[in-house]
Image (spheres, rainbow, N blue to C red):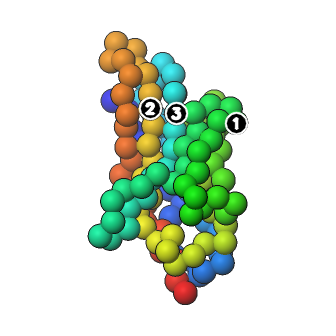
Amino acid sequence: QVQLVESGGGLVQAGGSLRLSCVASGTIFSVNAMGWYRQAPGNQRELVASNTGGDSTTYANSVKGRFTISRDNAKNTVYLQMNSLKPEDTAVYYCNADLTRPYSGRAVYWGQGTQVTVSS
C-alpha cells in the first residue's frame, strides 16, 4: 500500500504564507513526479505545481512567482511554499505522486487533501 499524507494547511490572512508538506510512504521503487493540485468549491481540480525531478518544475500561471515546489527525494516528500497568498488561493490542496512500485508497476496516487483558506 502507498499513502500520501499532507500537512500544513490552515487559515491565513491575505498576504501571508503557508507551507504544505506531503510524504509518500509504502514500498516505492521510484518517484517519477510529485506535485500539488487544488480544487475550490464549484471548480474543477487544477494543477498548481509539479516536479518531475531536479529543476524540472511546472507552475500554474496564477501562482508563478508566489509558490515554490520542492522535493526531498530521500524522504519521498514534496513541499509547496506559498507566499503572498490571495483569497482566490482558497481551496482544498491535494498531493499527487507518480510512483513505480515493485511488482505493481507505475501508477498515480492522491492524498486526502488539506484545506487552505485565505481571508481578505
Disc 2 target residue:
98
Mark 2–mark 3 contact, CB under 8 Å? Answer: yes
Horizontal and vertical percent position of residue 88: 49, 74
Q: Going from the N terminus, do you reach mark 1 or mark 2 first?
A: 1
Alpha carbon of mark 2 to alpha carbon of mark 3: how far?
5 Å
Q: Can residue 22 be seen in this view?
A: no
Alpha carbon of mark 1 to alpha carbon of mark 3: how far?
12 Å
For this view, does 43 lie left or right of residue 28? left
Mark 1–mark 2 contact, CB under 8 Å? Answer: no
Quadrant of the snapshot with the C terminus: bottom right
For this view, does 49 lie left or right of residue 38? right
Disc 1 target residue:
55
Horizontal and vertical percent position of residue 66: 67, 63
Kind of residue at disc 3: Ala
The residue sitting at 51% across, 22% down in the picture is 30
Horizontal and vertical percent position of residue 70: 65, 44
10 Å crowding of disc 2: few (<14), some (14-19), many (20+): some
The residue sitting at 63% across, 48% down in the picture is 69
Horizontal and vertical percent position of residue 59: 58, 51
Q: How many marks?
A: 3
Disc 3 target residue:
33
10 Å crowding of disc 1: few (<14), some (14-19), many (20+): few
Q: Height in image: 32 above or below 80?
A: above
Q: Height in image: 9 above or below 105?
A: below
Residue closest to the eye, 105 or 21: 105
- Secondary structure of residue under mark 3: strand
The residue sitting at 33% across, 66% down in the picture is 43
Q: Going from the N terminus, do you reach mark 2 or mark 3 first?
A: 3
- Secondary structure of residue under mark 1: loop
Q: Height in image: 12 above or below 6?
A: below
Kind of residue at disc 1: Asp
10 Å crowding of disc 3: few (<14), some (14-19), many (20+): some
